[in-house]
Every structure is written in C-alpha cells, then in structure tokens.
Amino acid sequence: MTEEREGEDALRRAISGSRLGGLSPDEKPSAGAILQAMGGIRGLIESIVPGFTFLVLYTITRDVWISVLVPLGLSVIFVALRVFTKGQSALAFAGLIGVGISAGLALFTGRAEDNFIWGFITNAVFIVVILISLLARRPLVGFVTGLLTEKPYAWRTDAAKRRVSFVGTLLLLTVFAARLAVQVPLYFVGESGVQALAATKLVMGLPLYGAALWVVWLMVRSVMRTDDQENKVS
C-alpha cells in the first residue's frame, strides 16, 4: 500500500511538472492554460516550425537531404537556445530526438515519406497505452484528473465521473487513431503524397490535440463543478 502511494505521489509530481500541470480540472478552461499545456508560444514554435519547414523545402526542392536536414538543424538551435537561456530543455530534447530519428530514416532509405514513420510509431504507442487503460478500467483521463486533484480514486465512486473519464479517454483515442487513419494511406501513396502527408500532420498535430484537450477539460470540469456545488450545499 505504501509503495502504491509512493508511486502515485511520484506520478503526481511528474504530471504537475509537465505541461498538463497547469490544467486545473475544477477551473474554467482558458486559451492561456491550453496554450501552456501545449508548451506555450515557444513550445508551439519548436513543434510546428520543423514540420512546416520540411513541407516548404520539399515543395520547392524535392530534395530529401535539404528537406530533413534543415529542420534537424533548427531543432538543434531550439535546444541550444533552451540550454543557453536555462529554459525547460527536456521537451526540446525530446523534439530533437524525434526529428533526428525521422530524418535518419528518410536519409537511410532516400524516401521523403519515411520521415513520418516515427510519428506513426509514437501515435501507435499512445493508442496502445490508452487502450490498456480502458481495458484495465482505469481510463487515462480519470487517472490523470485524480492525480491533478489529489483525489486519485474519486472518479471511481461517481457514475458521472466514470462516464466522463471513459468518454474523454475515448476522445483522445479517437485523435490518435484518426491521425493514423488519415496519414498512413497517404504514406503508401509514395512520393506524390508527401506534401499532403506533411500538411495533414501539421493540421492534425497540435491544433487537433488542443481542440480535444479543450473538450475533455470542459467535460471533466462539468462533473467537478457539480461535485463542488454539492459540497457547498452540504
């Protein structure tokens, strides 16, 4: 029991220190908080610019080397700036690793579309994790909400919270599944589908994730607010 509690405390600290730490389930959703959950303005730039640069360069040059190495160089610069300004460099490093692996795959095969394989893998991993949480009857949204509110089991004892946790987790699952459903067929089109694949990845990246996060937050807040109102009445 003690080990379980220690594990929960460690997870709570990790989530609080992550981008999701700024989201409070019992507060009204705000654009600023959602933006912060996605890394803030700086995080958005670091996430979007490499992919956008790839799209522009490949459209102009059709050269795989230029199209993947320039975004990789930009990612290195982003990490260097984080380190130099003593900012949170962990997420920038993670982005650099992703861009580096993607670039390596494309350069190894000489196929621009292979630049997106790593993205498929990470989406598939998220899908597996979410499915496991659902099958284990520990929906990810309920679990994270419990840690953020320091009431890890509250969602289990209330039917409305259980339903919202399940539906919210399904919504996140839909986001990751939709990415693969749309992007994988474009990958198999080959070279002619690279531009559409790059553009689709940008649109279905942070914008779609941010919209889903907003909806999930509204859903969670609806049951949290009801709970708070009941506590005030009692």
Image: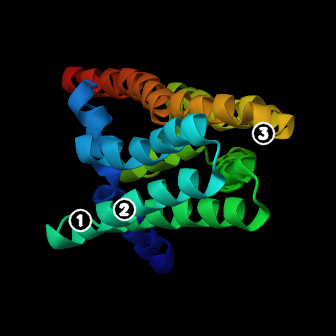
Task: Work out how far the residue at label 3 is from the one at label 2, CA to CA, in angstroms.
Answer: 29 Å
In contact (CB < 8 Å): disc 1 and disc 2 = yes
Q: Residues within 10 Å of mark 2 (few under 14, many from 20)?
A: many
Q: Residue at x 53, y 44 (%)?
A: 54
Task: Work out how far the residue at label 1 is from the one at label 3, CA to CA, in angstroms.
Answer: 35 Å
The amino acid type found where label 3 is placed reads Glu
Q: Position of residue 210 (x, y in %)?
A: 42, 31
SS class, disc 3: helix
Q: Is residue 14 visible?
A: no
Residue ID for mark 3: 191
- Residue extending farthest to the bottom is 3
SS class, disc 2: helix
Q: Which mark is residue 82?
A: 1
Q: Position of residue 40 (x, y in %)?
A: 26, 43
- Residue extending farthest to the right is 188
SS class, disc 1: helix
Q: What is the quadrant of the C terminus in the image?
A: top left
Q: Nearer the viewer, residue 232 or 93?
A: 93
Q: Residue at x 50, y 72 (%)?
A: 4
